Image: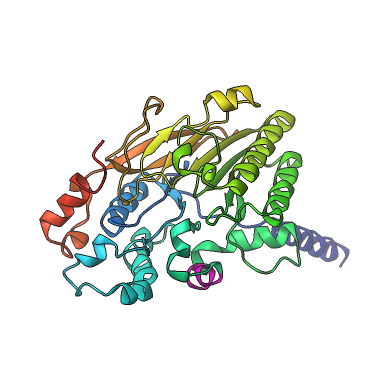
Amino acid sequence: MKRVRVLLLLFCSLLAGAQAKPSTPPAGKTGAFKFAISGDSRNCGDIVMPAIAADARAQGAAFYWHLGDARWLKGIDEDIANAKDAPAPSLEQYRGMAWQDFIRHQLQAWGDTPVMLGIGNHELYGNKTRQEFLATFGHWANQPWVEKMRLHDGPNDREPRTYFHWIDHGIDFIYLDNASHDQFDEAQMNWFAGVLGRAAKDPDVRALIVGAHAPLPDSFGKGHAMDDWPVGVASGRRAYQLLLDFKANSGKGVTFFGSHQHFYMPNIYNTAYWNANGGVLPGYIVGSAGAHRYALPGNAPAGSKTMVYGYVLGTADASGATKFEYREVYESDVPKNVRARYAPDFIHWCFAENGDRK
């Protein structure tokens, strides 16, 4: 009887320990911890995203992290206007169906690979709100491991938000919401500071990867970033400084990912400003999931690319150190079921003409 009681107590202890740790996304199919990141899938995203999904899944990505701007909303996405299976909608009709289109033609392309969906500024066009975003995309913006992480941090914190984090394979993945010009507000900054404080003390966290739609200020992409509004400059610099302090005090790695600019750019914070004001953090812009592509700035760092589509594939080792590879997708990668929805010349237009061509 005594042995049974001991075994029962041991079982309960193990069960409690398991419940205390938030769950994480399923491991990648190759056994290695890999994940995919990109943003800005408006305009031609219904064509490009399935190609990205197919490549990332073939690489064994455990999840995909979308950095916002799923659909245009300011105007009608070209991939909706030119689809053969439905007449072109009016702007009002389009705004009523654009998010369902994104779910059907982009999110579902990932199959059983989890998607973590961040909010971008275009999610708030057409008088849409954060509440509508969460109501529509709660499955992807508030995955079970995100919800459990939020409740783990604060048992009474039951309402999902458009900023969130989760821990997987020793990496704390943090998404910040800068989709409107009142951000980052104090509530989000306080939350962010709390997440960093806990991560610094947690021996199971070995690195941070921080994502947001718009890049933090003073990068090589400052022409279209948090530099565009006063609150963005002030709060974005505070957020960057918090990351510098975290790295200095904890010795743990930090990497930032943004989109908003429709190109690929590595090493975005090796600028004169950050070299003179605290230091350079690794950072990337990867806004190349289908949106109209922008010209690169004249001072773009080596390795920058535009008039391309693709995503970043991260591969992490047991220490939390992660290698990042930009993987392009090409017109020939568009799946057959997607090709069936469009005339061949429109698919070619998306790859050859959808951008500033510089």
**Residue at point 70% right, 35% down?**
246
| 334, 68: nearer the viewer | 68
Question: Which of the 4 image quadrants contains residue 151?
Answer: bottom right
Q: Which residues are magenta?
A: 131-137
Indicate left or right for 331 with 238 as reference: left
Indicate left or right for 342 with 142 as reference: left
Indicate left or right for 11 with 240 as reference: right
Q: Decide: is 159 above or below 306.
A: below
Quadrant the N terminus occupies: bottom right
Say whether residue 54 is visible. yes
| 162, 214: nearer the viewer | 214
Query: Residue placed farthest to the right in the image?
Result: 2
- Magenta region, main secondary structure: helix
Indicate the position of residue 121 as horizontal and vertical percent values.
Answer: 47, 57
**Residue at point 45% right, 34% down?**
324
Indicate the position of residue 281 as horizontal and vertical percent values.
Answer: 57, 30
- Taking the magenta stretch, the answer to whether it contains residue 135 is yes
| 78, 182: nearer the viewer | 182
**Residue at point 25% right, 61% down?**
79
Indicate the position of residue 330 as horizontal and vertical percent values.
Answer: 23, 44
- Taking the magenta stretch, the answer to whether it contains residue 136 is yes
